Amino acid sequence: MGALNPRRRKRTAREVAERAGVSERTVRAIAAEPRAEYLARAKARRARVTALRDQGLTYKQIAEATGETCETIRRLIYEARQHGEWDKPQRTPAPATARVLREAF
């Protein structure tokens, strides 16, 4: 079930409810984002982050480019893996590292 008036809010439901003199539940019912739109928007965020990661950017660089925090970037990449939208690229050791490892063992 979608909202009667779907749009993104800038205030919390509690703030709006106190100001309007109604319950938080009423505010959520009137202003909630429809589930399908939320899921599409979340998928698009994950796709943008994983595309930047595929380009070789670090979490910090992705955070700066998107305006998110590093922790949010970690969570989005984790969620992308959980939803099967992104596979962690397989890293191959650098040739010097492989040689050192062979000699050590």
Image (cartoon, grey):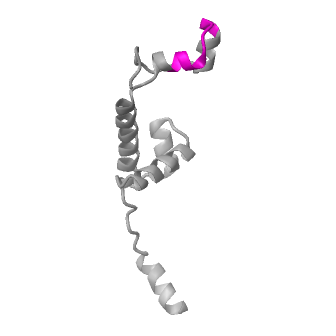
* Furthest-top residue in this view: 20
* Furthest-right residue in this view: 18
Compared across the picture, whether 31 is left or right of 20 comes to left
In the image, residue 4 sits, relative to residue 86, either above or below, namely above
Compared across the picture, whether 46 is left or right of 67 comes to left
Residue 10 in view, yes or no: no
Which of the pair 34/90 is nearer the observer?
A: 34
Q: Which residues are magenta?
A: 19-28
Residue 66 sits in quarter: top left
In the image, residue 104 sits, relative to residue 4, either above or below, namely below
Total number of numbered discs in the rendering: 0
Magenta stretch secondary structure, dominant: helix
Residue 14 sits in quarter: top right
Residue 68 in view, yes or no: yes
Which of the pair 99/12 is nearer the observer?
A: 12
Q: Give percent across and percent down for residue 83.
A: 38, 52
Q: Give percent across and percent down for residue 93.
A: 43, 75
Q: Give percent across and percent down for residue 33.
A: 42, 25
In the image, residue 51 sits, relative to residue 31, either above or below, namely below
Q: Residue at x 59, y 13 (%)?
A: 16
Q: Give percent across and percent down for residue 35.
A: 39, 31
Asked if the magenta segment contains residue 22, the reply would be: yes
Q: Residue at x 60, y 15 (%)?
A: 23
Q: Residue at x 35, y 30 (%)?
A: 37
Q: Residue at x 51, y 92 (%)?
A: 103
Which of the pair 27/73 is nearer the observer?
A: 27
Asked if the magenta segment contains residue 85, the reply would be: no
Viewport quadrant of the N terminus: top left
